[in-house]
Image (tube, rainbow, N blue to C red):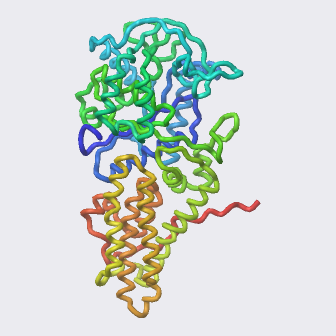
Amino acid sequence: MAAVPDAFYITTPIYYVNDVPHIGHAYTTLACDVMARFHRLDGKRVMFLTGTDEHGQKVEKSAQAAGMDPLVFCDKVSRNFRDLSSLLGFSNNDFIRTTEERHTVACQALWRAVIASGNNDIYLGKYAGWYSVRDEAFYGEDELIESPKGKLAPSGAPVEWVEEPSYFFRLSAWRDRLLAYYDSHPDFILPAARRNEVVSFVKSGLRDLSLSRTSFKWGIPVPDAPGHIMYVWFDALTNYVTAVGYPDTGTASFKTFWPALHVVGKDILRFHAVYWPAFLMAAGVEPPARVFAHGWWTIEGQKMSKSLGNFIAPSALVGKYGLDAVRYFLMRELPFGADGDYSHRAMVGRLNGDLANDLGNLVQRVLSFVAKNCGAKVPSPGTLTTDDDRLLDASETLLDRARALIDRQELHLVLEEIWRVIGDANRYVDAQAPWALRKSDPLRMATVLYVLAETIRRIAILVQPFMPTAAGRILDQLAVPGDRRTFTALVDAPALVPGVALPKPEGVFPRYVEAAA
């Protein structure tokens, strides 16, 4: 998807600094982290970007309410999102803040590039209409919801009537060009249902977009237009090219990594799939490679809401269940792209079923049996049978299946494929019964254990993007060197070497037991 075949650029949306990090933020960034780790293990150069969106009227008001300078307020709240990366083991290469000088330079350069195109895509006018401070979005009368509390945005956010001088982006002129782009790039927006929503929205006609504000000051100044501050979405979206060196499109970074894969929540798809490609094309810059919009989490069947007090802090999840369990659950529980529900019951079911029973028990019983019956060394196999070959083939072809699924952001299906082989391996253990072979056919016992150990090695290498800590512990117990843990090792490097000493096996996934009342 990147400009250079062996490069991969993935971004989260930048998170608004008056939010508190919750499960939704963790979910988006975790998905990006999994894909970034996968591509690094597959030998690619990876750029993984996340960060914070720190401008706009909402931030200015929040800082005022807190009695703080806006930048000091942003410094404090942005730290919460940096800490999220440490908490959940995210491997981002960069963390961008829209208050950085490099970003101001990029935004003003993009604005000037649109002007310099000579197509009159930006013009000065007057905005009069409905604006949601919470959404940082403008809405037409036909989009609003009437309520006892007054007019509301489609999101349920309050709106206010705004009248002020504004620069506009001539979005109305981009309907046919955007539709043509979607048609020639059918996978530009995924999943397909989200693509259909965007196409329908654009076909219905586009309004020109107010691109500047004069009623507040906290933002990036519009070049050569005193008093005008850039509309926060023009500012925020530009972060994706800022991080790879824009406006210098000749840098190695920009030429290597742009265009990017953007992963966003479905609520901000319109900004990324309509406004952003139009801004870029108007400035003579290639649009992103893809915009993937995922769904929302509910909590125990209810929408996350500050009024309900059911926002779940990622730190609470990790503290209760452990990092690997949280990472696994969030990536496995629902199809990536769909909505889903978090519940304690579902989390415990995944932890005790998939992790402790399926993978954990497989690793523990195989390696414990090797330790007791093979001198704590990698067994020496004899002639392989059809059953042996079948299991080894299933684990060997996992990588190709995983690559195809990762390329379409079907992360949950990657885990389903891995767990299918884990299930095969557990059934193989039961069918081959190495404990019964211990005296009757020790060579066959060694062969069965070797096949299982090699299968576990392959599974552990492939599960690293999802659960790097747990996978690393499994590979440690197989004495796999650090330089033999990439995907290349699944293809080119030798399998486990018979006779290599193995450390004492230790459980990787303890069962979750409810605390006594």
x, y percent for residue 312: 62, 43
- Residue for point 52% across, 63% down: 355
User: Between residues 114 and 183, which one lies in front from this camera angle?
Assistant: 183
3 to the left or right of 35: left
* Quarter of the image that includes the C terminus: bottom right
- Residue at 58% x, 64% y: name it: 352
The quadrant of the image that shows the N terminus is top left
- Name the foreground residue: 111 vs 275: 275
Q: Position of residue 66 (x, y in %)?
A: 64, 23
Q: Horizontally, is 228 left or right of 251 in the view? A: right
- x, y percentage for residue 410? 41, 49
Q: Residue furthest right?
A: 517
Total marks placed = 0
Percent x, y of residue 260: 34, 36
Q: Is residue 156 left or right of residue 396?
A: right
Q: Nearer the viewer, residue 267 or 218?
A: 267
Identify whether 157 is placed above or below 22: above
- Position of 164 compared to 192: left or right? right
Q: Residue furthest bottom?
A: 440
